[in-house]
Amino acid sequence: MEDRELVQKLLVKDDQAYRYFYQTYRDKIYKASVYLLGYNDPDAEDVTHEVFLAALQQLPQFEFRSSLYHWLYRICMYQCYERIRKRKRLVATMDEELETAARSQSMGKQDRELEEKEKRKMLDMLETQKQLLGEPCKGLLNLRDGQDKSYAQMAGILKVPIGTVMSRLARCKETLKELFFRALKEAKHG
């Protein structure tokens, strides 16, 4: 079925056209989202469905300046990059939360020496909690924080897409944050 004919049938809500549209392009769009987000990324399937929903909503504006697949691919790229941007913001927010948690423990101390001692204790506790993480997380955190590598550099070293690095790093930081707060709570009560 040609693109023009398919779009016309989709606009009149032809059920067979919907099935044909989805079956024809689903695997290609899924592969594109996996390529952009990374292998085994749980968001790849969601992005694939979101692409079709967005395409059906925007279909009346489709102008046939490109093929239908190319248009879907551009929507897919946009959806994937939006996910990556959200992950970046999440990682930055978690970094700030960890820093704020460490800082909040030392606030209110008048004596500079006590403040430095408290800060060292928090950093040591954070480092201890880092050691409790599994090797993949320790390695990722070392690349990012210890060696100050960018996401792109980390993706090159690990030979995985940048989205995979970002999602793994976000999960590792979230786990570290939970371990840190648990240890902090235990230290206060123990």
Image (tube, grey):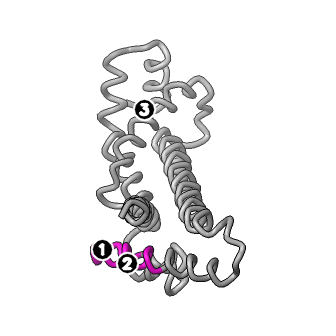
Sequence-wise first label, 3 or 1? 3
The residue beneath circle 2 is: 128
Magenta stretch holds residue 134: yes
Label 3 to label 1: alpha-carbon separation? 57 Å
* Marks 3, 2: nearer the viewer: 2
* Secondary element at tag 2: helix
Q: Residue at x 32, y 37 (%)?
A: 24
Residue 129, x across and y down, in percent: 37, 73
Residue 127 or residue 32, whichever sits in front: 127
Q: Which residue is mark 1?
A: 132
Number of the label disc, if any, that sits on residue 2: 3
Q: Is residue 6 above or below residue 120?
A: above
Q: Looking at the picture, does residue 106 appear above or below residue 144?
A: above
- Across and down, in percent, residue 187 comes to 40, 66
Q: Earlier in the sequence, mark 3 or mark 2?
A: 3
- The quadrant in which residue 189 appears is bottom left
- Structural distance between the alpha carbons of marks 3 and 2: 61 Å
Q: Is residue 155 visible?
A: no
- x 31%, y 72%: residue: 133
Q: Relative to residue 158, is residue 73 drawn left or right?
A: right
Q: Secondary structure at mark 3?
A: loop
In the figure, 57 relative to 93: above or below? above
Q: Amino acid at mark 2?
A: Thr
Q: Quadrant of the N terminus?
A: top left
- The 10 Å Cα crowd at callout 3, few under 14, some 14 to 19, many 20 or more, is few
> Residue shown at 43%/33% (left/top)?
52
Q: Amino acid at mark 1?
A: Leu
Considering the numbered disc 1 on the image, is that residue within a helix, a strand or a loop?
helix
Cα–Cα gap, marks 1 and 2: 7 Å
Start-end of magenta stretch = 124-140
Callouts 1 and 2 close, C-beta under 8 Å: yes
Tell me: 108 left or right of 7.
Answer: right
